[in-house]
Image (cartoon, rainbow, N blue to C red):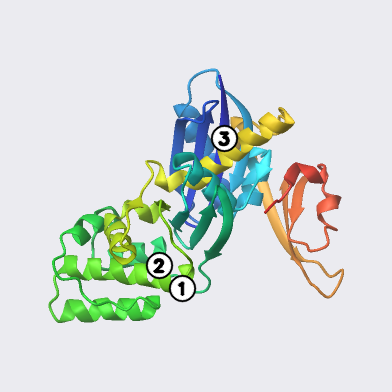
């Protein structure tokens, strides 16, 4: 039996999946990155291996997420892709005629516009984190409610409070004020959900044509209050996939499978023993020209495995491994 590994490493969560040859889920891991992506990937590999059937062989591996280059070196990825591509591929696997993907993760959010199975437009949040999972986590902690219960509270709301959603500072200030004047907690929470959706539609979607079928994925999709708020604003059904929180990793696995079928077995995957290898990273500024690029180098022992971050490719071609072993594609 063969499987295809997908890894999605973001600032908040690290997700690993293994799909079979029929593109069905075999096992998945969703865990916190905790500011240490190398340890998160290695711990995830240990947990994932325990869930796999004996004798399964990883045919190909793919990585995505903000730490896709780093995790690609750790696992030995055949494919390294950006989040937009990975999430779009996963969404189309679930809903082949999907036309809009709403994705809200820990510290970023994005919208992907699909037409005829092709990405025709996309956008990501820029400087404001008001519509992301980290902000919701923070507010849940501040009012003493588990984030897992946030959606249930929101659905009990009868008269949602008006909460400013244009930035985290104003939103938190509004929530504190509503508490002080006696609003019910469920009305404050659903008011927050509605404000986050308005923030997303105004600052991320920015007037893009949001057409059905609409898929909502990412960790925040677990919050049914946000789903309800989206459906009220858009006046359309919003679909949440079963594995909504690991869709990026699913996309990476599907891309790895596609690459293996087109290009054959490369054998880049280091194996689950990569969890026990010692990797080190260093960063430095290149002084080769006025660009002053920030270069990141990852090593195993005395061997430099890869460098990235330069605009000219100077450091990438000085890797001890062939440069094509870590190919960043968009």
Instruction: Give me the residue at 87% from left, 68% from top.
Output: 288
Give the total of numbered labels. Answer: 3
Identify the residue shown where x is 13% and y is 70%. Answer: 184
Residue 308 percent location from the top left of the image:
74, 56
Which tag is nearer the camera, tag 1 or tag 3? 1
Q: Earlier in the sequence, mark 1 or mark 3?
A: 3
Do residues under tags 2 and 3 come within 8 Å of each other at their CB atoms? no
Circle 2 sits on which residue? Answer: 131
Residue, disc 3: 5
Judging depth in this view, the residue of 106 and 79 nearest the camera is 79
Secondary structure of the residue carrying numbered label 2: loop
Q: Where residue 51 sits in the image (x, y, percent)?
A: 45, 28
Is 32 placed above or below 322 here?
Answer: below
Q: Which mark is residue 174?
A: none
**What is the distance, in whole Å, between disc 1 and disc 2 at their CAs?**
9 Å
- Label 1 close to label 2 by CB (< 8 Å): yes
Query: What x and y, as percent, mark residue 81?
Result: 63, 49
Check residue 203 in the rendering and tell me which mark sits there, or answer none: 1
Q: Which is nearer the N-term, disc 1 or disc 2?
A: 2
Indicate the quadrant where residue 29 lies. Answer: top left
Q: Quadrant of the N terminus?
A: top right
Which comes before the other along the chain, label 2 or label 3?
Answer: 3
- In terms of secondary structure, where does tag 3 sit? strand
CA gap between label 1 and label 3 equals 34 Å
Does the CB distance between marks 1 and 3 fall below 8 Å? Answer: no
């Amino acid at each position: 039996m063969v499987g295809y590994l997908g890894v999605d490493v973001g600032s908040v969560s690290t997700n690993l999946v293994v799909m079979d040859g029929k593109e069905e889920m075999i096992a998945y891991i969703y865990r916190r990155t905790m500011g240490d992506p190398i340890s998160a990937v290695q711990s995830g590999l240990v947990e994932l291996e325990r869930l796999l059937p004996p004798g399964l062989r990883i045919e190909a591996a793919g990585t995505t997420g903000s730490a896709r280059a780093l995790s690609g070196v750790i696992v030995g990825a055949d494919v390294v892709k950006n989040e937009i591509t990975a999430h779009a591929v996963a969404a189309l696997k679930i809903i082949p005629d999907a036309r809009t993907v709403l994705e809200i993760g820990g510290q970023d959010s994005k919208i992907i516009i699909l037409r005829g199975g092709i990405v025709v437009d996309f956008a990501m949040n820029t400087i404001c984190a008001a519509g992301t999972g980290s902000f919701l986590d923070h507010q849940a902690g501040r009012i003493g409610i588990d984030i897992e219960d946030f959606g249930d509270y929101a659905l009990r709301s009868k008269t949602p409070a008006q909460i400013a959603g244009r930035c985290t500072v104003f939103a938190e200030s509004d929530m504190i004020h509503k508490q002080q004047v006696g609003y019910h907690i469920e009305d404050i929470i659903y008011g927050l959900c509605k404000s986050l959706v308005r923030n997303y539609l105004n600052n991320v979607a920015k007037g893009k044509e949001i057409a059905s079928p609409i898929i909502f994925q990412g960790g925040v999709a677990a919050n049914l209050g946000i789903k309800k708020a989206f459906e009220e604003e858009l006046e359309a059904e919003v679909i949440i996939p079963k594995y909504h929180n690991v869709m990026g990793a699913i996309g990476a696995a599907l891309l790895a499978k596609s690459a293996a079928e087109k290009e054959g077995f490369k054998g880049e995957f280091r194996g689950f023993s990569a969890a026990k290898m010692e990797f080190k990273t260093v960063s430095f500024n290149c002084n080769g020209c006025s660009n002053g690029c920030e270069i990141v180098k990852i090593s195993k022992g005395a061997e430099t495995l890869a460098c990235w971050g330069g605009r000219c490719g100077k450091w990438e071609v000085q890797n001890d491994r062939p440069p094509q072993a870590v190919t960043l594609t968009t």
